[in-house]
Amino acid sequence: MIAAHNLEKRFGKFIAVDRVSFTIEEGEMFGFLGPNGAGKTTTMKMIQCISPKTGGELEVLGMDVSTSQREIKRLLGVVPQENNLDPDFTVYENLLVYSRYFDIPRTEAEKRIGELLDFVQLSERKETPIIQLSGGMKRRLILARALINNPRLLVLDEPTVGLDPQARHLIWDKLKRLKSQGNTVVLTTHYLEEAEYLCDRLVIMDQGKILVEGKPAELVRKYIGADIVEAENVPAAEACLKRLDANYEVLGDTIQVYTDNTQRVTGALLEECRLGQVTARRATLEDVFLKLTGRKLRE
């Protein structure tokens, strides 16, 4: 569905995307992760044909983004990060007006709108002005709008940004259902649990480059291990971990141990080092993200 080779985007001397290569297969849900300024949104804009590439190759749906922008855009559904619904129209009117951009006949558009409002659970809000919708309702309506043209590829930029847990999980359920129906979905998100739950594969980007690519569970096993054991950062703890030849990291007052043998590590810290408190938890994609991109705040 998407193939990039040495894809590059420059703004003057600044390199936003630095010769990245990746492929996205039909039916996949693929994620772009990274701290602010990593280049993920810029990559998404090139996929959407709204920002021209500076160098390299990029094909979307088998077409070159440099020569087939109109053809590609007709086959895309886009959920932008911002809520850009038309405030002068109702829920129904927003979808009807948008359908006209794709030359969808009125009868067919009305049929699709009814089905989509059912899908995103907004049928009872059909005549509601946009200003009266909650944040979760607006995001669901934008998802419905992105599906009005029956797109072959759905592109989502922070699809659940600012939503409460209930609204976020509802969006997740809808995206899972779309994928089960054969849709190809590409998304960016700052919610690592969202990426871990939804994505078949993903890349983590930083400073315009792809650091890693793979399935979420495989990346966790490769870079962290099955579990993380946390203990107080005291000399006795580090001494024990060095004897165990453990893979650990010191984070301020805490030591994190990355391990596939939780019982051995916790036993050593409690019995040999006599530490008062040791906790263990499952390793997550967020641990991989922080290990690879660092913990320093990005602006």
Image (cartoon, helix red, strand yellow):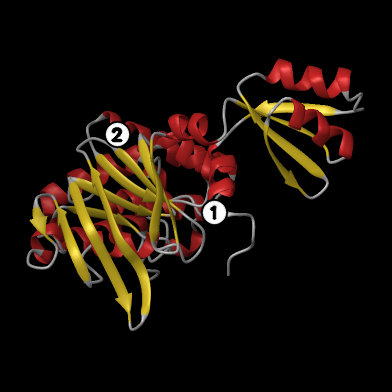
Q: Nearer the viewer, residue 202 or 276?
A: 276
Read off the residue under disc 2. Answer: 179
Q: Residue at x 44, y 41 (%)?
A: 171
- The residue under label 1 is which amino acid type? Thr
Left or right of 194, for residue 80: left
Image quadrant assignment for residue 278: top right
Residue 106 on image: x %, y %: 12, 54
Left or right of 272, for residue 19: left
Quadrant for the N terminus, please: top left
Badge 1, how many Cα within 10 Å: few under 14, some, many 20+?
some
Left or right of 107, for residue 139: right
Quadrant for the C terminus, please: bottom right
Image: 136 above or below 206: above
Residue 293: image tag:
1
- The residue under label 2 is which amino acid type? Lys
Q: Nearer the viewer, residue 181 or 287?
A: 287
Q: Residue at x 33, y 42 (%)?
A: 30
SS category of the residue bearing label 2: helix
Q: Nearer the viewer, mark 1 or mark 2?
A: 1
Q: Nearer the viewer, residue 87 or 265?
A: 265
Q: Residue at x 23, y 38 (%)?
A: 183
Left or right of 108, for residue 230: right
* Residue positioned most to the front: 243
Residue 17 on image: x %, y %: 34, 65
Alpha carbons under labels 1 and 2: distance apart: 29 Å
